[in-house]
């Protein structure tokens, strides 16, 4: 299978998961920094954003490796928490702003297109403490002004902007599930944060277009792809539909179509979690839909009809409409417990083609995290991660199949370029094409998958699909 020439192959990461805290000034904590300081014990082996991979000082070393592999694109973020020394007066930290300049210039010099998110969980803790974070319209206003500054400083070189990475995740884990610091279980706050982010995105799109810049503005959304236990059983189909409404259409519909679905709004009213809006908001959202969307896709959700009635006294959660279902005999990643189901790439592509009028999109994250990868090190010191190679091959096969059938998918960004810190998981599961050796001064070493990805980018050919039957996973 040939990979079309226009199809981009790259990799992704974020600021907080790579930079480390070198040079960070007092008062510049992001939400992730504050969480780590208050609950360091939930992060695997106490590893967190304080050191990460030290990209702050070693970015050139990493970009040289990106060039060696042949990456065409690199998706990362700017750390909003570090970009200012005063978040209300919008006083820019010129040292950090220069670092972003240097990274962008180094990427371009290496022939790599930068794709930049403005927030990847890096909301300043100051704004959380003073205004309640995304519960506040003042934070919406300040975010739009932050975006304007980024466009003025870097818009001559960066043409692919993304307001948020996974905008639904932080408030879901804090306000809906209560599993992350500060464990403020409040479904109304959850929904208000979701809405304010949608509004902020529309306002940023308007600001960008008002500046008449030549690029695009979009978001990165973690698509939670739900399959019903039994496709021919209507209660299971309804369960999967409800899952999709609350996890995906909540953001994707207003951002791509310019409005929320009537069905979703009815459910919000029914569950007494309707967001608060102002009269002009509908027009702003309708007139300023995004230009492109990146979709993060790792594993499928499988659901069935709810087995028990929802306790009417319990706080709202979309789980009142479905129960999880574990597919017997599934392939799965034992390190994460996540099912491996590459055909979901094709199924998602068909949704984008048929339900969203072939809107421009790309896979912005997909990858395989493995625990104790050192066990696969060979005598030369290289990690032989054939399981990762097989994972990428299978997922790309289904994605390219969809492209060949007319899906408007522009590319594939592997998560991640190097091993990096993840929330709570820290470095427990490794995702990178490049190893970060925590025991030896964060030394970088190419994995076998890095060499394989280099050849894939150069030759643009996937092996015969019959080889996938022999694919192995750790």
Image (cartoon, rainbow, N blue to C red):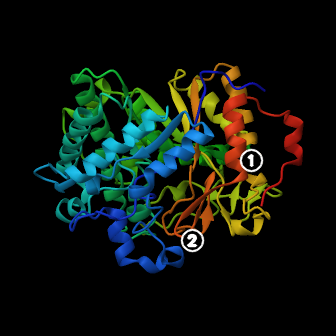
Return the disc, 2 or 1, that comes first in the chain's sequence.
1
Question: Element at badge 1?
Answer: helix
* Residue 455, placed above or below residue 272: above
Q: Quadrant of residue 29?
A: bottom left
* Residue 7, placed above or below residue 336: above
Taking the spot 38% from the left edge, 63% from the top edge, the residue there is 175
Q: Is residue 163 visible?
A: no
The residue wearing badge 1 is 389
Crowd rating for badge 1 (residues with CA inside 10 Å; few <14, some 14–19, many 20+):
many
Q: Pointers 2 and 1 in contact (CB under 8 A)?
A: no
Taking the spot 38% from the left edge, 27% from the top edge, the residue there is 216
Taking the spot 83% from the left edge, 54% from the top edge, the residue there is 472
Of the two numbered discs 2 and 1 in the rendering, the one whose residue sits closer to the viewer: 2
For the N terminus, which image quadrant? top right
* Residue 374, placed above or below residue 87: below
Crowd rating for badge 2 (residues with CA inside 10 Å; few <14, some 14–19, many 20+):
few
The residue wearing badge 2 is 440
Residue 395: x and y, percent?
Answer: 71, 40
Q: Is residue 113 left or right of residue 210?
A: right
């Amino acid at each position: 299978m040939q990979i079309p020439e226009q199809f981009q192959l790259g990799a992704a990461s974020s600021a907080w998961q790579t930079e480390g805290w070198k040079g960070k000034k007092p008062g510049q904590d992001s939400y992730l920094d504050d969480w780590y300081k208050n609950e360091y014990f939930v992060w695997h082996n106490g590893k967190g954003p304080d050191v990460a991979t030290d990209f702050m000082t070693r970015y050139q070393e990493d970009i040289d490796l990106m060039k060696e592999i042949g990456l065409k694109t690199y998706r990362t973020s700017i750390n909003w928490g570090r970009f200012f020394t005063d978040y209300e007066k919008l006083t820019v930290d010129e040292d950090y702003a220069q670092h972003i300049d240097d990274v962008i210039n180094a990427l371009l010099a290496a022939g790599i297109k930068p794709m930049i998110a403005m927030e990847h969980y890096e909301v300043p803790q100051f704004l959380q403490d003073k205004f309640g974070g995304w519960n506040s319209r003042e934070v919406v206003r300040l975010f739009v002004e932050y975006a304007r500054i980024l466009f003025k400083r870097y818009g001559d070189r960066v043409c692919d902007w993304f307001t948020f990475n996974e905008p639904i995740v932080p408030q879901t884990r804090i306000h809906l599930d209560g599993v992350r610091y500060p464990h403020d279980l409040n479904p109304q706050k959850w929904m208000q944060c979701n809405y304010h982010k949608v509004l902020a995105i529309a306002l940023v799109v308007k600001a960008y277009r008002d500046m008449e810049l030549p690029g695009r503005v979009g978001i990165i959304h973690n698509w939670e792809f739900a399959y019903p236990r039994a496709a021919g059983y209507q209660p299971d189909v309804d369960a999967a539909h409800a899952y999709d409404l609350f996890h995906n259409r909540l953001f994707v519909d207003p951002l791509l179509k310019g409005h929320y679905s009537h069905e979703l709004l009815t459910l919000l009213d029914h569950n007494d979690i309707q967001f608060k809006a102002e009269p002009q908001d509908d027009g702003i959202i309708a007139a300023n839909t995004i230009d492109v969307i990146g979709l993060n896709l790792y594993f499928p959700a499988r659901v069935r009809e709810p087995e028990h009635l929802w306790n009417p006294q319990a706080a709202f959660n979309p789980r009142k409409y479905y129960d999880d279902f574990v597919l017997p005999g599934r392939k799965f990643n034992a390190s994460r417990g996540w099912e491996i189901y590459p055909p979901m790439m094709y199924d998602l592509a068909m949704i984008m083609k048929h339900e969203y009028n072939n809107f421009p999109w790309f896979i912005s994250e997909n990858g395989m995290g493995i625990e104790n990868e050192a066990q696969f090190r060979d005598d030369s010191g290289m990690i032989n991660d054939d399981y990762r190679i097989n994972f990428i091959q299978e997922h790309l096969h289904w994605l390219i199949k969809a492209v060949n059938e007319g899906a408007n998918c522009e590319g594939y960004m592997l998560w991640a370029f190097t091993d990096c810190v993840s929330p709570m998981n820290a470095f427990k599961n490794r995702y990178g094409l490049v190893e970060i050796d925590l025991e030896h001064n964060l030394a970088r070493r190419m994995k076998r998958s890095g060499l394989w990805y280099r050849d894939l980018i150069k030759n643009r050919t996937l092996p015969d699909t019959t080889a996938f039957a022999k694919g192995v996973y750790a």
